[in-house]
Amino acid sequence: MYLIRLDDASDHMNTERWERMEQILDENGVKPLVGVIPLNRDPMLLEFPEDPFFWEKAKAWQDKGWRIALHGYEHVYSTAEGGINPVHNKSEFAGHTLEEQRRKIREGLSVLQVKGLTPDVFFAPSHTFDKNTLRALEAESDIRIISDTVANDVYFQDGFTFIPQQSGKVRELPFKLTTICLHPNFTSDAEFEEIDVFIKAHSGEFADPMSIAETTRKKGFVDIAAEKMYFLKRKLSSLR
Ligand SMILES: [Zn+2]
């Protein structure tokens, strides 16, 4: 099965491209997991004009069955750490004290809740977080599901259910559950076309994000092999 994850929804976004993405998903009956940035201070994203209707839109997404995730706090990188899932060596969370991470989770969550959003999944900017991020989520929220890491299927570890996230574009992968992470703000016309074609070709293979429940399944051999392969490939391509 595939799961679509949309990153970087906030009150500063490319509204037109988000609408195009929403239209493609609606037409194909696919619901995504969508990551909302509570207090966007990312200079790259602040180049998009403020959308005064953003919070109403996000609430409408939630009401029609899109699953809302807490996506960091300000989306600003302040450490050079990769943490548990070192996809990049920069983070808003990994490397910070538990106290600082608790503050970010607490304040971020409160912004979303005031707007009527009830996120029950977390993913960090650049996919980077550490054990303190998990402890901070435990202390400050009811969120017990993380979207990120590489594995074959959903698994349980350190008190959390992990939904693996293995691809940054639409493509066929052999995992039991593949999360395809898309960034509507920066999706080109050609990529929208590709996404539409892929979704149509794989109709019936998209998981309803709300159906992914907490699990007690432990990581198995296939999950560990997938993770090792992924990071080995990344390492080799960075050496080129
Ligand atoms: Zn992001």
Image (cartoon, rainbow, N blue to C red):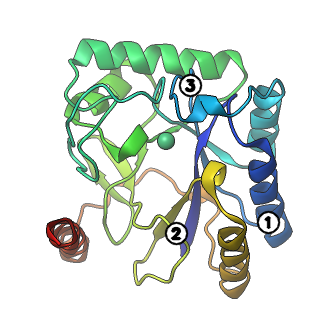
> Are the two marked residues, 3 and 1, in contact with CB atoms closer than 8 angstroms?
no
Going from the N terminus, do you reach mark 3 or mark 2 first?
A: 3
The quarter of the rendered structure image containing the C terminus is: bottom left
Using the rendered image of the protein, determine whether residue 119 is visible from the camera's viewpoint. no
Residue nearest the observer in this picture, 102 or 90: 90
Residue, disc 2: 169
The alpha-carbon separation of the residues under discs 3 and 2 comes to: 24 Å
The alpha-carbon separation of the residues under discs 2 and 1 comes to: 15 Å
- Name which residue lies at 52% across and 28% down: 43
Q: Position of residue 199 (x, y in %)?
A: 69, 77
Q: Position of residue 78 (x, y in %)?
A: 30, 25
Callout 2: few (<14), some (14-19), or many (20+) C-alpha neighbours within 10 Å?
some
Residue, disc 3: 40
- Secondary structure of residue under mark 2: loop
Beta carbon of the mark 3 residue lies under 8 A of ligand 1: no
Callout 1: few (<14), some (14-19), or many (20+) C-alpha neighbours within 10 Å?
some
Marker disc for residue 24: 1
- Name which residue lies at 39% across and 60% down: 164
Q: Is residue 174 above or below residue 134?
A: below
- Secondary structure of residue under mark 3: loop
Q: Position of residue 66 (x, y in %)?
A: 70, 49
- Name which residue lies at 32% across and 56% down: 149
Instruction: Give the residue type at disc 3.
Output: Asn
Residue 184 located left or right of residue 28 = left
